[in-house]
C-alpha cells in the first residue's frame, strides 16, 4: 500500500479537506477513557480530528466522517455538547 507522507505540522479539515496550521483548526479529541470532547487547547491526549469551522463540524457529523476519524460512535448528546463548546470557543476568540 502506498502511503503519502504528510507534513507533520499541517492538518486538514476532515469535512472540506482544507489545509491549515494547527492553530487555525479546531480539534475534537477522543480521550483514552473513550469520551469525546471539543479540545479547546488542541493538546489533549488522545486521538484527534480537526475541522475548520462549525459548518464543517456539522458536515463531518452528517457524513459520519467524525466517527470514522475518531474511530468512535458518537451520540447525539456528544454532538450537541461539542457543538456548543465549539461555538462558545469560536465566539469567545473572535468577539
Ligand atoms: Zn473545513
Image: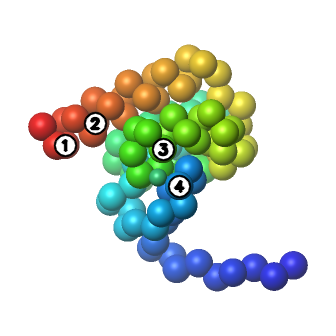
The location of residue 28, given as percent across then percent down, is: 50, 43
Image quadrant in which the N terminus is located: bottom right
Q: Seen in the image, is 58 located left or right of residue 74? A: left
- First reached walking from the N terminus: tag 4 or tag 1: 4
> In this rendering, does residue 44 appear at all?
no
Q: Which residue is mark 4?
A: 16
Using a 10 Å C-alpha cutoff, classify the residue at mark 2 as few (fewer than 14 neighbours), some (14 to 19) or many (20 or more). Answer: some
Q: Nearer the viewer, mark 4 or mark 1?
A: 4
Callout 3: SS: helix
Question: What label does residue 56 carry, if any?
Answer: 3
From this view, report whether residue 3 is shown above or below residue 54: below
Kindly report the distance in space between the C-alpha atoms of the residues bearing marks 1 and 3: 18 Å
**Res 2 quadrant in image:** bottom right
* Earlier-in-chain disc, 2 versus 4: 4
Tell me the quarter of the image containing the C terminus: top left
User: Which of the two labelled residues, at mark 4 and mark 3, occupies the earlier sequence position?
Assistant: 4
Examine the rendered structure and indicate whether residue 63 appears above or below residue 88.
below
Residue assigned mark 1 = 93
Give the alpha-carbon distance from disc 4 to disc 1, as whole Å. Answer: 22 Å
Which residue is more in the foreground, 81 or 31? 81
Indicate which disc, 2 or 3, sits on the residue closer to the N terminus: 3
Disc 1 crowd rating (10 Å Cα; few below 14, some 14-19, many 20+) is few
Rendered residue at 40%/38% (across/down): 54
The label nearer to you, 2 versus 3, is: 3
Which residue, given by chain and number where applicable, does mark 2 sit on?
Answer: 89
Number of numbered discs visible in the structure rendering? 4
Q: Secondary structure at mark 4?
A: loop
Q: Is mark 3 within 8 Å of ligand 1?
A: yes
Q: Alpha carbon of mark 2 to alpha carbon of mark 1: how far? A: 6 Å
* Residue 60 horizontal/vertical position (percent): 58, 41
Give the residue drawn at x 60%, y 35%: 61
Q: Who's the residue at 19% across and 43% down the image?
A: 93
Amino acid at each position: 500500500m502506498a502511503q503519502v507522507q504528510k507534513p507533520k505540522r499541517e492538518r486538514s479539515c476532515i469535512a472540506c479537506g482544507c489545509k491549515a496550521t494547527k492553530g487555525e483548526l479546531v480539534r475534537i479529541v477522543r480521550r483514552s477513557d473513550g469520551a469525546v470532547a471539543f479540545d479547546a487547547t488542541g493538546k489533549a491526549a488522545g486521538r484527534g480530528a480537526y475541522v475548520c469551522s462549525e459548518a464543517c463540524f456539522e458536515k463531518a457529523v452528517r457524513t459520519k466522517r467524525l466517527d470514522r476519524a475518531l474511530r468512535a460512535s458518537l451520540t447525539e448528546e456528544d454532538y450537541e455538547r461539542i457543538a456548543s463548546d465549539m461555538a462558545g470557543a469560536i465566539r469567545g476568540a473572535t468577539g
